[in-house]
Amino acid sequence: MSPIMELVGRSGFTAGMVVQELGWDDDVDDDLRLAIENTIDGELIEDAVEAVDTVLLWWREDDGDVTDGVVDALTDLDEKGFVWVLTPKVGRPEHVDPADLSEAATTAGLSRTSTAANLSADWTAVKLERPRRR
């Protein structure tokens, strides 16, 4: 198994998951996308017809308010699902301030649960989840 496939598997992606991709553009990491598709054994979808297990949200500084993007990402997300927000790494064009992303997560009622900085060469990935209910 390739290192990127291993990282994708450890990031919570599993076979059979339905993953919605938002914010795709020609600057995204195609190797990462392919690794996710291979891991889930399916294609990433843009328009959901039912609740999705995960949302992959590519976000850049010029995309607007990251809080709006994160809140919109919850529209089709299953109650137990999670959101991976991918932003350009520090020092790259279109970088998103981590404080803005943390504020967006809090406003959307999500918790930042992990960061996979090595998931992609040019993108930082932050996993956001709903708080666990007792």
Image (cartoon, rainbow, N blue to C red):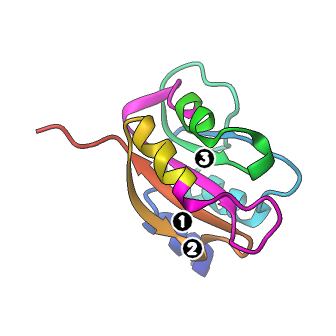
The disc placed on residue 8 is: 1
Name the side, left or right, on which 12 lies relative to 2: left
Per the image, label 2 sits on a secondary structure element best described as helix
Q: Please tell me whether mark 1 sits on a helix, a strand or a loop.
A: helix
Mark toward the start of the polypeptide (2 vs 3): 3
Where residue 17 appears, x then y in whole percent? 49, 43
Give, as a three-letter code, the residue at label 3: Leu
Residue behind mark 3: 56
The residue at 56%/61% (across/down) is 98
Which residue is tagged 2? 117
Q: Which residues are magenta?
A: 73-99
Closer to the camera in the image, 3 or 76: 76
Q: Is residue 36 above or below residue 45?
A: below
The residue sitting at the right extreme is: 26
Name which quarter of the figure residue 49 lies in: top right
User: Could you tell me if residue 40 is visible in this image?
Assistant: no
Q: Is 113 on the left-hand or right-hand side of 45? A: left
Question: Residues under labels 1 and 3: Cα distance?
Answer: 12 Å
| Image position of 5 (left or right of 94) | left
Measured as percent of width and height from the top left, residue 127 is found at 47, 55
Extreme residue toward the top, this view: 49
> Where does the N terminus fall, quadrant-wise?
bottom right
In the image, residue 131 sits, relative to residue 84, either above or below, namely above
* In the foreground, 97 or 34: 97
Distance (Cα) linking label 2 and label 3? 15 Å
Residue at image location 63% in from the left, 45% down from the top = 57
